Image (tube, coloured by chain):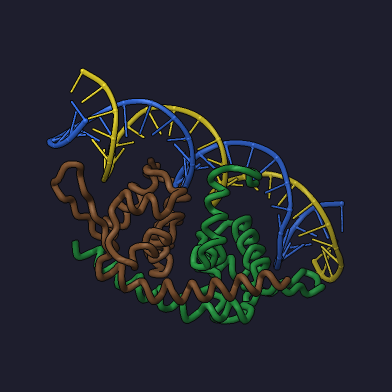
Chain colours: A brown, B green, C blue, D yellow
DNA sequence: TACGGTAGTTACCAAAAAGTAAGTATGTAA
DNA sequence: TTACATACTTACTTTTTGGTAACTACCGTA
């Protein structure tokens, strides 16, 4: 849980408010989120499928990140009232629109890695 | 200081290693780094100038982030042996090459903010 | 000899993020 | 009645990040 007041939190919020770029990072830049989004560009995933696709993630973190991505409008969550339960996750329009940027940053990352290794 | 072993650290490193995108985020996606890089696209900055340009940042965090950006090859640090001392920071070629991507993510962030506000 | 200006460094503490492990709910099928 | 499958929750602990405030080093000048 978060405290309601702290310089730390105030700074974070101020940055997110005044800079759309930092706001963007707050939506998709945390630990497992890029991996989740990346996988989802391939199509629809169920909870268990995603878990198997990213084996190191814990169920807690997977749930948490999926919920945040949903709240932030990047993915949809569809519950099928069956037994055993089925829940499917898919990218929204907004989520899909991230894809080309992810790819560019991915390319930049490869370049940066090479630059760093040369030294 | 970091521990030398923890699942947390291992996960982070595994993700950075296998995904250039997450690696890219590790270079430019932490708290004040986007703000610093953003400012620097305008030109060369001295330590004190940057401090005044981003008033909420503490000296400790500014130093720390500048050093990491330097280590990662995104900026250069030039010391002029004068008194009082003068140190100038500027983007490297690699750092500059981030600029168009920053702008795109920035635009995406604005779009995302609007999407979120509608609800 | 104390003071100003620049660019830091350091020790310590608070807050946030991430991980672990055990537990929940539901219906079906053995 | 016990186990299975799926999709989570929850309480608790560890690890990491960020903030605060005081201190350092250097030289010129008053």
Q: Give residue B14's quadrant in the image.
A: bottom right
Q: Is residue A31 visible?
A: yes
The residue at 56%/67% (across/down) is B52
Q: Is residue C6 above or below residue B59?
A: below
Q: Quadrant of the C terminus of chain A?
A: bottom right
In the picture, measured across the screen, residue A116 lies left or right of residue A20, that is: right
> At which x and y percent is residue A39?
37, 62
Q: Nearer the viewer, residue B84 or A119?
A: A119
Q: Is residue B56 visible?
A: no
Q: Quadrant of the N terminus of chain A?
A: top left
Q: Nearer the viewer, residue B13 or C27?
A: C27
Q: Is residue D3 above or below residue A3?
A: above
The residue at 51%/76% (across/down) is A107
In the picture, measured across the screen, residue B117 lies left or right of residue C2, that is: left
Q: How many marks?
A: 0
Q: Give residue A60's quadrant in the image.
A: top left
> At which x and y percent is residue D8?
28, 42
Q: Nearer the viewer, residue A33 or B92?
A: A33
> At which x and y percent is residue B119?
19, 61
The residue at 35%/70% (across/down) is B109
In the picture, measured across the screen, residue A43 lies left or right of residue A15, that is: left
> At which x and y percent is residue B74?
62, 73
């Amino acid at each position: 849980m978060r405290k309601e007041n702290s310089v730390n939190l105030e700074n974070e919020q101020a940055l997110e408010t005044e800079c759309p770029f930092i706001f963007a990072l707050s939506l998709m830049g945390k630990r497992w989120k890029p991996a989740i989004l990346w996988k989802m560009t391939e199509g629809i995933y169920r909870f268990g499928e995603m878990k198997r696709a990213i084996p190191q993630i814990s169920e807690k973190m997977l749930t948490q990140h999926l919920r945040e991505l949903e709240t932030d409008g990047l993915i949809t969550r569809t519950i099928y009232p069956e037994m055993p339960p089925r829940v499917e996750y898919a990218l929204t329009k907004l989520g899909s629109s991230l894809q080309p940027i992810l790819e560019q940053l991915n390319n930049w990352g490869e370049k940066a890695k090479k630059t760093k290794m040369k030294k």
